[in-house]
Image: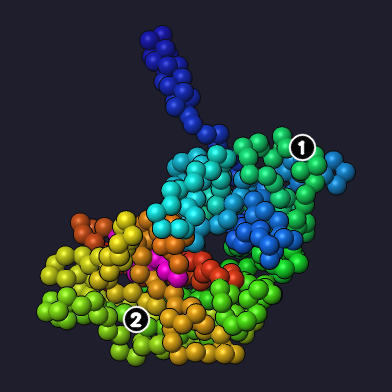
Amino acid sequence: MKLHKSLFFLLLLAVAGCKKYDIAPLVKDPAYIRVFNDLSNDIDVFHSAQVAPFLTFLMDPKTDGDVPNDAEIIGDYMGIRQLYSLSYPVNEANSSIGTGTLNSGQPGSAPVINLYPLNYEYPGNAHVLTAPVMNGFDLSAWAQISSGKHRIMFVVRPQNNIPFKELASTIRSRVLLDTTVNFEKGEVYTLEVVSRDLDNGKYGLYIRHEQFVHQAFDENKLYIGFVNLSGKKPLDNQQGFGNYIGDNVRISTTYNLFNDAVYATQADVVYDAYPEYKDTYMTTLNTKMDTGISFQPLPLLPESAFFYQGILRSYYAFSNNNVFFGTLPYYSFNLLDADKPVTDPDSRLGYLLRCHRDPSSYNNYSSRDNNRSAPNLNLLVNSGNGYHVYSTVNIMEIVYDRVYTMQLQRGFNNVPKN
């Protein structure tokens, strides 16, 4: 009997020794939040009133007078969001804080390693309780919080490795935004710090009460919705469209299919448009900061369209400044100034967004490579002893001269029937 007790005690020690994280207490009546930093514009001669785009997110802060020194939730080292984000954290088993890598975007330039921690969003890879599967979507990129009213604060912090609570009070007093938000039980929210006016350094908190958890989506179709989160048009972009996508945005789409016959005989890279999807009008965004997303259905081709002679087609890619044209079907979206529409999609007065890149490595490309490109909206997954194509629901967020893609993915354990 003593031997059994000893073995039981050793087993308990072994289990305790393998424990990596404390188990978070359950949240009663939770709501779910996700937080982004959209301040993607650098400080320059035209925007000297701007703040550095590096923040600390605080929920229910504790203050010494007007200076925050702690909080119930701290999302520290929050840098600029990535251009492509999923409905679940890509590296959810890893540390919530990593070292960032930047690239100047110039051909041949070496990456610049940031010597400070960097988070692209909250919760990101933080070890917190997250949202369950809702409406068939994996939403573990959203963190659980208690429902009800919460004070939300963002502080501008320096780009160093000092945790927020150890920063000097003069730094912690640099409060950018301070507001109170009511979160309803069981609902999903996306919070984004946005620039209201780049020229005058005015900022705001955009809050979207996500409705995709309540909407019906056909699993045999792709869906896409656009929202304009740009602020006032900057003065240095008043002459023409420039790098600013516009106040009123007309959006059309083309579904591009690789022409194998032409390529086989002439080695010319030619794409044909899928019937009824050649510069087809989709919508016009006449307002900004809309909290509702109107999702447009798009065709999901049969799996045979993603293979050629039994081999999976390729993504469009760069390698040592060489371009490798992909052969996978892909959507492109033409974003034009609705007040001054132009017919040439490659004109400086338009913004042609090609969704033809490899999602698995898209955020690792330099800014030059990502210019006016986005991940392929068709989800290719190796499941059921082979590659299969799954539909996705996508939110495209226009922020001045950038388009951020948020992709909602269903579980892909079941092989699709198409």
Toward which corner of the image does residue 337 lie, by quadrant? bottom right
Percent from the top left, x then y, of residue 299?
A: 35, 80
Check disc 2: other Cα within 10 Å, few if <14, some if 14-19, many if 20+: many
Q: Amino acid at mark 2?
A: Tyr
Q: How many marks?
A: 2
In the rendered image, the vertical position of residue 20 relative to residue 304, given as above or below: above
Prevailing SS of the magenta stretch = strand
Q: Is residue 354 visible?
A: yes
**What is the basis of the colouring in this image?**
rainbow
Q: Which mark is residue 255?
A: 2
Q: Could you say whether the residue bearing mark 2 is in a helix, strand or loop?
A: strand
Image quarter in which the C terminus is found? bottom left
Dot 2 or dot 1: first in sequence order is 1
Q: Residue furthest right?
A: 65
Q: Could you say whether the residue bearing mark 1 is in a helix, strand or loop?
A: loop
Q: Amino acid at mark 1?
A: Ala
Check disc 1: other Cα within 10 Å, few if <14, some if 14-19, many if 20+: few
Percent from the top left, x then y, of residue 85?
A: 48, 59
Q: CA–CA distance between discs 2 and 1?
A: 53 Å
| Image point (73%, 37%), residue name | 167
Q: Nearer the viewer, residue 303 or 175?
A: 175
| Image point (53%, 43%), residue name | 114
Toward which corner of the image does residue 39 lie, by quadrant? bottom right
Percent from the top left, x then y, of residue 118?
A: 56, 45
Q: Is residue 113 left or right of residue 34?
A: left
In the rendered image, the vertical position of residue 176 relative to residue 334, given as above or below: above
- Residue 375: in magenta span: yes
| Image point (58%, 55%), residue name | 80
Q: Is residue 181 left or right of residue 240?
A: right
Magenta range is 372-381
Q: Is residue 205 visible?
A: no
The residue that label 1 is drawn on is: 168
